[in-house]
Image (cartoon, rainbow, N blue to C red):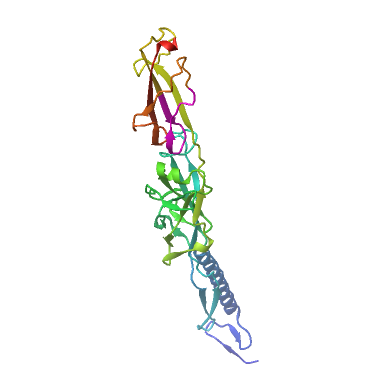
Amino acid sequence: MNTHKNTSNQIISNNRPVQGDTAMTKTNNRRASAFRTTLTSALALALAAGASAPAFAAITNTGSVTASTPSGGTVSDTASESVTVATPVRSFTVAKSIASITTAAGDDASFSDGGDTVTFNYAVANTGNISITGASVSITDPGPSFIDSGSTSHAGANTLSSITYVSGDTNTNGVIEPTETWIYQATYLLDQADVDFAAGVTNGVTNTITTASATAVVGGSATFDSGASTLTAQATILENAVVNLTKVATRDGTTPDNGSVTPFDPGEPIIYLFTVANQGNVTLTSMTVSETAFVAPSGASAPTITCTISSDATIASLAPGESETCTATYTVQEADL
């Protein structure tokens, strides 16, 4: 074995390191190992931090390590890891429905008529994997149409309100996250003409979305998946046609008086008042008021009925809540006594 002395008087073998070099090597190895451990932890933290962020390609991470050798040189190594991430999908659907139709606001408190309100719901669901900005959602809706008994469609007489956010942002962050659904609403004030067209017709109220758009938090526009959406909402307005007739006798054309207190004398006129009222939810037309029975001891014929808005006993139309008064005058004869 070849040996030589160094300046510190240590015996150094060419075949094995001395005690001091062994300690140095162990120290360097521990440092390199510690560095690798630290690097691994740092990479894990970095990847964990980036895991929730949207990605559009594979995530590639490269780490390196450098260590000193006993002879004063360096050794190094690198390692890479590529992680495959999902393909970005920016898409959403809209499911339209009719949330409610009021009944109490119009003249008919039990059935929908002019003055009542239809509330439409729009359920906007994020079907992709990229969040959508809630404020960017735009839905084009022309408003409802009303189908009559002859299957003819009539555009609504009024205008649909603006579509506004109602609920769904459970964490109040302002974005529609993947799998999250937000509810938007719009209202429409029924006109009596709308009800007259559609009342009694199955699905007589119909409303179809034209299109919708939204912007993803990253990557631009989101795709409106119309094929998976519910674009049309329908409802039926029940028909409640009710006419009411009251008839009273008067002396002056105003105050009810049937002669029970002061009997009518011959020559006195009995002015009959016929009040026709529409108490339903649809407009009534082509009404005729008539005497179905008039019996006078004298055998006289029934008096002629004349309505205020016409020169005869007909009423062209009455909307819900409207009424019309008609009169007929009979003069008492001696033969009636």
Q: Is residue 25 left or right of residue 141?
A: right
Residue at 39% x, 26% y: name it: 304
Residue 324 position (above or below residue 81): above
Q: Position of residue 125 (x, y in %)?
A: 51, 56
Which one is in front, 17 or 3?
17
Location of residue 82 (image quadrant): bottom right
Q: Position of residue 122 (x, y in %)?
A: 47, 52
Which one is in front, 189 or 212?
189
Quarter holding the N terminus is bottom right
Q: Position of residue 127 (x, y in %)?
A: 52, 61
Q: Is residue 98 visible?
A: yes
Which one is in front, 212 or 78?
212
Residue 271 colored magenta?
no
Residue 278 colored magenta?
yes
Q: Is residue 12 left or right of residue 140?
A: right
Q: Position of residue 135 (x, y in %)?
A: 40, 55
Residue at the limit of the structure toward the right, as seen here: 1
Residue at 61% x, 89% y: name it: 14
Residue 336 position (above or below residue 236): above
Residue 326 position (above or below residue 320): above
Quarter holding the C terminus is top left
Which one is in front, 236 or 272?
272
Residue at 39% x, 34% y: name it: 315
Magenta stretch bounds: 274-293
